[in-house]
Amino acid sequence: MQEQRRQEPVQEQRRQELGQEQRRQELEQVQEQVQEPVQ
């Protein structure tokens, strides 16, 4: 039981880090699209 409780916060932290990483990549993609000259 203690093992599961110990692992849960780690999984939550990883999930948050992955979410931040995905948002960062999405922001970078949006910036690249904005920087492209519109013809």
Image (cartoon, rainbow, N blue to C red):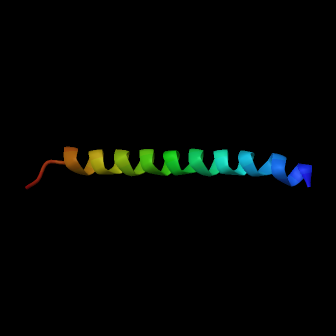
Image point (90%, 49%), residue name: 2
Q: In this image, 15 relative to 29: left or right?
A: right
Image point (21%, 48%), residue name: 34
Q: Position of residue 27 (x, y in %)?
A: 35, 47
Q: Nearer the viewer, residue 15 or 31?
A: 15
Q: Quadrant of residue 31?
A: top left
Q: Position of residue 39 (x, y in %)?
A: 7, 55
Q: Quadrant of the N terminus?
A: bottom right
Q: Position of residue 36 (x, y in %)?
A: 20, 48
Image point (44%, 49%), residue name: 23
Q: Position of residue 13 (x, y in %)?
A: 65, 45
Count up the numbered dots.
0
Q: Nearer the viewer, residue 19 or 39?
A: 19
Image point (53%, 51%), residue name: 19
Q: In this image, 30 relative to 15: left or right?
A: left
Q: In this image, 9 relative to 18: left or right?
A: right
Q: In this image, 5 relative to 29: left or right?
A: right
Q: Nearer the viewer, residue 12 or 2?
A: 2
